[in-house]
Image: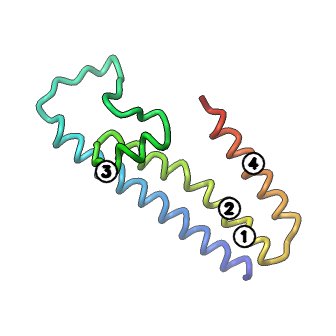
Amino acid sequence: MDDQRLETIIGNLLRAGVLLAAAVVLAGGVFFLAQHHAETMHFHTFRLEGEDLRSVPGIFHAAVRLDSEGIIQLGLLLLIATPVARVLMAVVGFELEHDRMYVLVSLVVLAVLLFSLIHAA
């Protein structure tokens, strides 16, 4: 695999990830408006109802049940996962090119990303 091909694959991965995340958030927004169109909104407070949407399993469970808030949060998770997938693809691509230095650098970046995601709370 050459550098140009790796850049093309990574660019397509980023584009697909962002577009997929945007489509999921848009679908969740449409569902939210359909479910809550008659409610009075209170913009000074933010609260999530029902399912525990503060955990990844809770978000998946809510999205599978077509809960609009769960679908929106699933789209946001997809958006967050996009750069992580990009770094994983870079690790694989650099390994296929036998470029050990860039594999090591990419693994360090991946470790920092995963650490910050796990300890973000």
Disc 3 to disc 1: CB gap under 8 Å: no
Residue marked by disc 4 = 111
For the C terminus, the quadrant is: top right
Single out the residue that lies furthest toward the left: 38
Q: Quadrant of residue 98?
A: bottom right
Q: Is residue 10 left or right of residue 47?
A: right
Q: Earlier in the sequence, mark 4 or mark 3?
A: 3
Q: CA distance from mark 4 to mark 1?
A: 15 Å
Residue marked by disc 1 = 92
The amino acid type found where label 3 is placed reads: Leu
Nearer-the-camera pick, 46 or 4:
46
Q: How is the image coloured?
A: rainbow
Residue 26, which numbered label? 3
Q: Position of residue 9 (x, y in %)?
A: 60, 74
Q: Earlier in the sequence, mark 4 or mark 1?
A: 1
Q: CA distance from mark 4 to mark 3?
A: 31 Å
The secondary element bearing badge 4 is classed as: helix
The secondary element bearing badge 1 is classed as: helix
Residue marked by disc 2 = 88
Please name which of the two marks, 3 or 1, marks the residue nearer to the observer: 1
Q: Is residue 36 left or right of residue 94?
A: left
